[in-house]
Amino acid sequence: MITREAIDAMGPWAHCVHLGNGLYTIPPEQWDEHVGALSYQHFIASTLPSLLSRLLPGSASETSVVDMGCMDGWCSLLMWKLGYRCIAGVDVDEENIARARFLSKHLGCEGVEFHVAALEKLRLPKPMDIGLMLGVLNHTAQPVELLRAARSMICDFLVLDLNIFVDRAASGLACQNSYLYDPTLQSNIALNFEKGGPFRHDSARNLVMQYDPQSVLMLLQYCGFHNIMEIPMPLATPSWMIPIRRMYVAFKNPNSSGHIDSLVLREAYTQSPHNYLSSEMDLPYLGKAMGEDE
Ligand SMILES: C[S@@+](CC[C@H](N)C(=O)[O-])C[C@H]1O[C@@H](n2cnc3c(N)ncnc32)[C@H](O)[C@@H]1O
């Protein structure tokens, strides 16, 4: 049986995953310190299921997924929990992949394959149906290479999630993601250093790239994606997250029939059993998603 000591020995943990018997990667007494990461996980866990179920023609079990920059694999394992059965998680940092394999083993998701690799150099045996690239683009100095590699790895579409940079004055935020910029310009990219940042192997090292929404669209188009949709935030997204987070779906092929009506999507979010309207920080949900039996 897994122990607190065994979990701690694999740390430090950046995401909260329940491993059963009330044992979490990040123990509950530390959740206050990790509130940003926890609400981000909640945002993804609340958004992805309804988004994917509306975009995918087939069932989850027939759809293959590559989780690019998976870190400790929490989202690959969430996909397993959601019924996906062909999942590859990829990260350039071997310690992250060791954590991902540790979680996968203890949660009994051994069908999820984890690879240590730089996405730009990775050759998967065959392309996967869909790709997730969550929270990665801000941490690479080669966004074009990364997105082109992502495009070559998938058949259908990429879900891209990133921090964007926002007008500090308009958002009322004073966090690292907010800058003073001129929103009338066509596109903006800002750079800032994240001192002592945790991503040791990223090509950007501790440099963080912040794109405004328009520059993300241009970048995706430049890298060959089509039919790019900016996904509206769920109605009850935590207020601090609305100005700094964006999710896009970008299709590989111009003739893709994929589209989603934003009104349908909003309805999906509000009808989802785990939506923000029921609770803004429903932490136990993470446990349910990641390990507890229903
Ligand atoms: C901010 S974390 C995001 C983790 C996870 N996707 C999530 O959303 O919670 C970024 C991850 O991308 C990985 N990464 C960055 N550049 C990469 C690259 N070129 N190839 C593979 N992994 C990369 C880092 O090692 C890090 O684990």
Image (cartoon, rainbow, N blue to C red):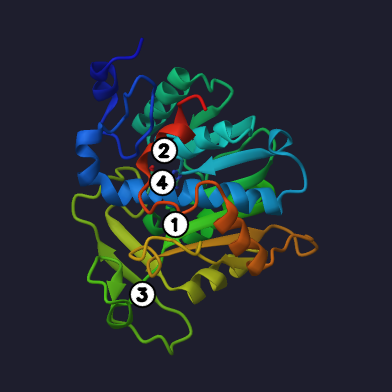
Looking at the rendered structure, the secondary structure element under dot 1 is helix
Q: Amino acid at mark 2?
A: Leu
Q: CA distance from mark 3 to mark 2?
A: 28 Å
Query: How many numbered callouts?
Result: 4
Q: Are marks 2 and 4 in contact (CB under 8 Å)?
A: yes
Instruction: Using the image, determine if residue 107 lies above or below residue 204.
Output: above
- Give the spatial CA distance, label 2 vs label 4: 8 Å
Label 4 CB, ligand 1: below 8 Å?
yes
**What SS does tag 4 mark?**
helix
Residue 236 % position (x, y): 45, 62
- Residue type at mark 3: give it: Val
- In space, the residues marked 3 and 1 are separated at their CA atoms by 16 Å
State the CA–CA distance, disc 2 to disc 1. Answer: 24 Å
Q: Which residue is mark 3?
A: 166
N-term mark: 2 or 1? 1
The mark that comes first in sequence, 1 or 4, is: 4
124 or 158: which is nearer to us? 158
Please tell me which residue is depicted at 44% across the width and 52% down the height of the picture: 278
